[in-house]
Amino acid sequence: MRGMALGKRKCERQETLWIPTGQVAKPPSHPFYKRLDGILAGHGFDDFVEKICAKFYAPRMGRPGLAPGLYFRLLLIGYFEGLDSERGIAWRAADSLGLRDFLGLTLSEAPPDHSTLPRTRRLIDVETHQEVFSWVLQRVAEAGLLKLLADKGYYSTERIVDLERQGLRTYISEPRQGRRRWRGDQAARDAVYSNRRRIRGRRGKALLRRRGERLERPFAHLYETGGLRRTHLRGRNNTLKRVLIHVSALNLGFLMRAALGVGTPRSLQGRAWNTVSAQIRSLEGAFGTLSITQAFLLIFSWLTFELTRWLAGLSMEHQKLTFTTGC
């Protein structure tokens, strides 16, 4: 019995000079970055950053620079991919077609070189990075996901008043101090009394008891999962710029968790096992206690059935396309 013919890999071959656009293979975009791009585009992120960064670019002539939206998106990738160096961010963007789609780059466009990131960072000041951080924080507040919980060391009347003006609810522990004299400062008095009333209530006390979960865990995600435990930058301002956008990516992760169920693209890797576990639990509820072998056999049969139905659908679509072209 003869088998298949032996094929050999061509070590050297002549590449096609011209390739029609319709023949270029385009893999599906990463679902996480696709949804994240939809959130940013839906709120006008690129228009916002281009407006606030226009003063740092030449009005008419000059060397083509890195677009502000592209620059900030690359820094967001640093958190979501756990990359601490800008060289690593540039390499990752050049290697992934899904990230190229998130950056808005076509197949004919080269991703930014790593040397353009520090040049653009030095061009844009710290205040502009803070505006981007505030913009993301405002989106989180609009979604009802923002609560400000802090220790006594962060308490100040000016900070509480400023946060109240932004429409944010504060739960900041108040240190012991003498009788306050407001001298007609009605706004400061109302803000301080509102914060005091919240931290003394049942909800405020419960939140303060959960400071370890609400404060310590985000820092672990920020520096360990996000890969910023070590920085390759010099100077306080350069480090502050990177940290501001890194924290902005963490806050965007809260929006993604509310919309998609996961806060980072790597969290999607465990969704398949979660689906299988949910099927096992549903089968146990329907048929009683099952052994591990029985549960996996049932799940395997279900997956085989779903795969067969999907392949049959592809075959029917192929037949329709073939008949309509007359071939």
Image (cartoon, rainbow, N blue to C red):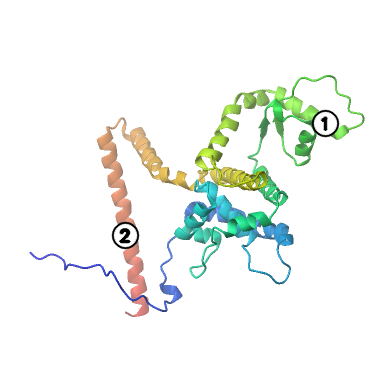
- The residue under the point 70% across, 63% down is 57
Place residue 193 in its image quadrant: top right
Q: Nearer the viewer, residue 41 or 116?
A: 116
Residue with the most extreme right position: 183
Amino acid type of disc 2? Leu
Q: Nearer the viewer, residue 218 or 117?
A: 117
Q: Is 112 drawn above or below residue 18 in the view shown?
A: above
- The residue under the point 31% across, 34% down is 287
Amino acid type of disc 1? Asp
x and y percent of residue 319 in the render? 32, 70
In the image, 126: left or right of 103? right
Estimate the spatial distance between the alpha carbons at disc 2 and disc 1, rounded to whole Å.
Answer: 65 Å
x and y percent of residue 78 in the render? 54, 49
Does any portion of residue 41 appear in the rendered image? Answer: no
Q: Residue tagged by mark 2?
A: 311
The secondary element bearing badge 1 is classed as helix
Q: Residue tagged by mark 1?
A: 190
Q: Nearer the viewer, residue 202 or 95?
A: 95
- The residue under the point 77% across, 37% down is 164
x and y percent of residue 220 in the render? 54, 35
Does any portion of residue 164 appear in the rendered image? Answer: yes
In the image, 15: left or right of 177? left
In the rendered image, which quarter contains the N terminus? bottom left
Q: Nearer the viewer, residue 220 or 256?
A: 220
Mark toward the start of the polypeptide (2 vs 1): 1
